[in-house]
Amino acid sequence: MEEKIITKENLIKLSTDLVNEGFNVIAPSEKGYTLLQTDPLLSLSDSQPLPKSPFKGYLFPKTEPLFYYKKGQHDYEFVDVNLQNVKNIFLAAKPCDAASVNILSKVFNWDYKDEFFDIRADNSLVISMACSTSDEYCFCTSVGLSPVSTKGADLFMIPLAGDKYAIRIVTDKGKSFAEKYSKYFSDGNSVESEKVLAGIKAPEQSFDTAKVKDWLDKNFESEFWNGIAATCLACGQCAFSCPVCHCFDIVDEDYSYKEGRRMKNWDACQFGLFTEHASGHNPRDNQAKRYRQRISHKFKYYKDKFDEVLCTGCGRCTRGCPVSIDIKEIVTEINNLN
Amino acid sequence: MSEQKFEPHIIAFVCNWCTYTGADLAGTSRLKYQPNVKLIKLPCTGRIDPVMIIKAFEKGADGVLVSGCHPGDCHYNAGNFHARRRWIMFHQLMDYIGIDSSRLHFSWVSASEGRKFVDVVNGFTDKVRAKGPFVKYQELNKEYAINE
Amino acid sequence: MNNLSQIISELLTGGKVTKVIGYVKSGSRSKPFISSKAEDAGKFIMDETCVNNLAVYLTKDEIMKQGKVAVVAKGCDIRAIVALIQENQIKRDDVYIIGVNCQGVKENFDSNVLAAKCTPCKVKTPAVYDVLIEMEKPKSEPSKENKKEEIEKISAMTDAERFEFFEKEFEKCIKCYACRQACPLCYCEQCIADKSVPRWIESSATKRGNMAWNIIRAFHLSGRCIGCNECERVCPQDIPLSLLNKKMSMVAFDEFGYEAGMDMDAPTLTGNYDIKDKEDFIQ
């Protein structure tokens, strides 16, 4: 992989240039992935821990209008949403978050090409950074990723000694970007960066997704599911803070009597009403069934459809769970059952 | 060209047995009151959930009037007592959030008080007209208005 | 925690209760755990990490349908149980309360400071219980945060400043409803926010929908909130919900001298009325 070097000073200058050119430059901070221009105190730390929320909100917002409607004399007029001026650059993203773009793109381009996601994803550049802040909740290595994975990234940063970063060019999009801003980069070689990568501590692998899928394929009715996640409050935090959970709800709302909009909002399969039918029947009427769905979707159904595991091992679901339900623990149990 | 003067939208939640009848009496007595108010008839003020008041502000009301039977006169005996306790809590919550609680007015108007109904409506409408449109709340709507 | 394990073991083997709801260790934290097996008795703990309000499980049919349940409860959790009894959601006999002589718990597991709610707590030794146990002495320091002062500071702002403050906070809301799910007093079988015909509270996480949701939840809890602060703890967006809910419980106390969850036999505030309630604000 071609490698360049950029000094921290130049990186800050480059970010400022990008902001002035109208890009949304988004980088991790304590509060989550925040816009550089609205958060001037943002400092790029090599040991920035995983932000509380992922950056999927910039590609798939928590709420967005699909179209507007206006009631005329005899019929409706529909007005499209204007998305053209969205250009994102995700800077120093965590590898587990960077990987989410490819994974999400599969479902949003399945039987229907979701133009809202596609326009944003096509106009986004992902610059991820090697992660040295994994903790006991991380398990990226169990789902085919690692703290130095380049999946989903266009450029990959590796912090070097002396306030500089190695930047590896992963995709053609990344190559064009590096060429456009070549004044900030100098040539590099991989000697130092390889040493840094070798020294990064990775979480120990807890389970094998192939074994897990194999068990899931055969055990829908297993007793294992009885009483699982009994303490779950159905609060939806796990789905909302997951970089790859993508379920959504569509509702119509009015702005006034004559005008309204159709909104697409985040939804979660852990909500009690998620599968309630118009008849009142609810096939997933207890938490055990809902949790079985969550695990099966992530480790079996998504793999069946798109050959991807719907999980990047970031651990946010467990860290943020009010009752500390640990998906890694449960999936490891399944792994050991097999 | 004359400037369009601001005319407030007032929504009034009124109880069927007292205030609505009082408003009717004002009508049959040919008493005039300002036309800005739109009445919503409920069986009793005890039916009013503050979510209805919030909805009224969301939809563009500049002022909300809530009116019912005098304490002791409730057709359902205690509906207005329950409502009164709720209103004590609710208008303090509105105040605390910074939503102008002077745009929310409560009154007791009985079935024979046609004159009082007219006074309440006229007084409140003048007060809200002087305050101007409830821009603060209506701006919450503009987030996903059609960008033409 | 021999005392606790012993009590739980006796309750389950003796058939006095069908299951026990308590806390077990989970890494550097603890988590709620429900068991009907006496052999699990040794797993239960009670220390400064046991912050969850377990009373939230007492209104769930799945958990209560088999019969009497024992629950490990701190002073704030017992207030929730008493409030549920006041509101006829559970009967005193449905629950065996393992009360805790609590010295404080942590909300933020990355710090060494106890929760802000613990410093002014008046129910460290609860008034209602079937048996009382001690907890491990907390290693963290008491918090110096003063929520009452923060609320008074906000009340002293101008209308416009207050609205701006709350508008900015509610903008962060993602409508996950974690606050509602973690609250022991949000037990409505159909929450008004889920009613779609008519749609009173929008489900979209827009400024308008968020404002309506947070105001109405604060209102539906006014005079009922017992101050466990679970809503604020579980909020993934760090919205300071205690500034709303505590303010309303202060209003309930100032106007009516009422505190929820203190007296099992007391009539609830908003479920009742007094013909002498004030009406100086009504024309």
Image (cartoon, coloured by chain):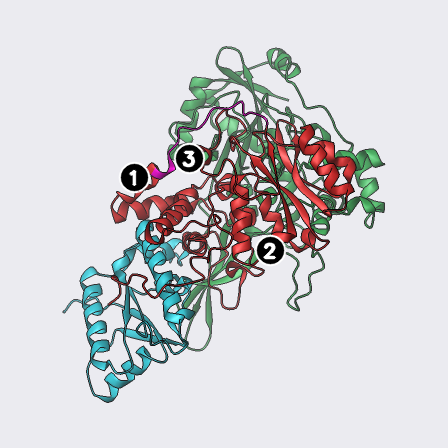
Indicate the position of residue A160 as horizontal and vertical percent values.
Answer: 54, 14
Res A235 visible: no
Circle 1: element type: helix
Dot 3: chain letter: C
User: At x 26% / y 43%, what residue is drawn?
Assistant: C157
Q: The red chain is which one?
A: C
Task: Indicate the chain coloured cyan by its letter.
Answer: B
Q: Is A10 displayed left or right of C275 in the figure? A: right
Most distant residue in the left direction: B1
Q: In the rendered structure, does residue C142 fall within the stretch colored magenta?
A: yes
As rendered, which of C36 and C98 lies closer to the eye? Answer: C98
Q: Nearer the viewer, residue C177 or A262?
A: C177
Q: Quadrant of the N terminus of chain A?
A: top right
For marks 3 and 2, give the CA distance.
28 Å
Mark 3 lies on residue: C120
Instruction: Please tell me whether the stretch drawn in magenta is mainly helix, strand or loop.
Output: loop
Label 2 Cα crowd, 10 Å radius (few <14 / some 14-19 / many 20+): some
Residue located beneath label 2 in the image: C90
In-image side of C86 versus B27 (left or right): right
Q: Please, what is the three-letter code of the amino acid marked with disc 2?
A: Ile
Q: Position of residue A284 (x, y in %)?
A: 70, 56
Question: Crowdedness of circle 1 by 10 Å Cα count: few (<14), some, many (20+)?
Answer: few
The tag earlier along the polypeptide, 1 or 3, is 3
**Subunit of mark 1?**
C
> Of residues A242 and C237, which is closer to you in this image?
C237
Question: What whole-number distance in Å separates the C-alpha atoms at marks 1 and 2?
Answer: 38 Å
User: Dot 3 lies on which element?
Assistant: loop
Residue pointed to by mark 1: C153
Is the C terminus of chain A in the top left, top right, bottom left or bottom right quadrant? top right
**Label whose residue precedes the other's in the sequence (1 or 2):** 2
Q: Do labels 1 and 2 share a chain?
A: yes
Residue stretch rendered in magenta on the structure: C136-148
